[in-house]
Image (cartoon, grey):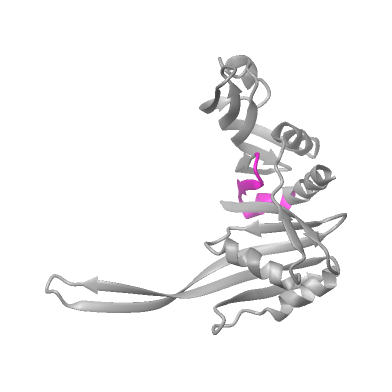
Amino acid sequence: MDRFYWYTIGLRTEFNFFVDSIKESTFNQSDEQGFKVEAISRDMVVGKFVQSKLVTQEFINPFGDNTVERRQVYDVIDFKFSRRANILLETKNPGRCTKTFFNELLKCSDYSLVVEAPKFKLPELIKELKAHGLIIIQVKEIELADIALSKDATGLLVVKGNLSIDDYELKLPLADLKHRLKKFKAIVDFHGTREMIEVHSSNKIIMSDKLAKLITPIIYKTLRHIDS
């Protein structure tokens, strides 16, 4: 399973200038960080951001002898920029270098980059996915947030089991209260591809790379709607 995150990008400079700057900021071992562009077109750039660091570990054997081991480790973020009505950024399985990644993008934009993490409205996203052929076979888990328990208190509820995304509000004792669907995890079928998917109301979806290739265009459509 892979972790995908989406962002909307505000860019106050030319997209081509931005892409050229990314290409020029190539990873090299001396700088310990940089980009590796793998594919590029007029409206898209795909690549990796790589950050390396030297890790030192000390081992002591039962006789008190010290052994020092040094090795180079790498954190990687797979990314894709797509320019449509707006600019969208997709990242896959980000390592521990997210802050550095965005700082380097800011430099490449000549400090004109604005990044926003959109929020999915899950009922609308589910409706859109179903309209394009997604079938929810079995819901394994749902998470409800902002449950209005009283005037001054809200709650969070995680429910596991064989659920229905369509009528959980009728079956759960708290679901008829005002709330927000925060997350669901389900087995789905999309045009013959049956996989597990975990969809968050943040900008995060966990799914296989195979399923991601099928539904990402729908995600992009939804994000354009959210952004507009």
Question: Quadrant of the rendered structure where residue 84 is?
Answer: bottom right
View extreme (front): residue:
152
Residue 135 against residue 203 in the figure, above or below: above
Which residue is rendered at x = 64% and y = 30% of the image?
181
Q: Is residue 203 magenta?
A: yes
Question: Quadrant of the rendered structure where residue 87 is?
Answer: bottom right
Question: Residue 143: image x %, image y %?
Answer: 57, 31
Residue 55 against residue 158 in the figure, above or below: below
View extreme (bottom): residue:
30
Closer-to-camera residue (77/30): 30
Which residue is rendered at x = 72% and y = 56% of the image?
115
Question: Residue 151: image x %, image y %?
Answer: 60, 17
Bounds of the magenta segment: 201-214
Residue 135 against residue 152 in the figure, above or below: below
Q: In the visual, does 71 lie left or right of 195?
A: left
Q: Is residue 63 magenta?
A: no
Question: Residue 201: image x %, image y %?
Answer: 65, 39
Position of the C terminus by quadrant: top right
Residue 130 against residue 100 in the figure, above or below: above
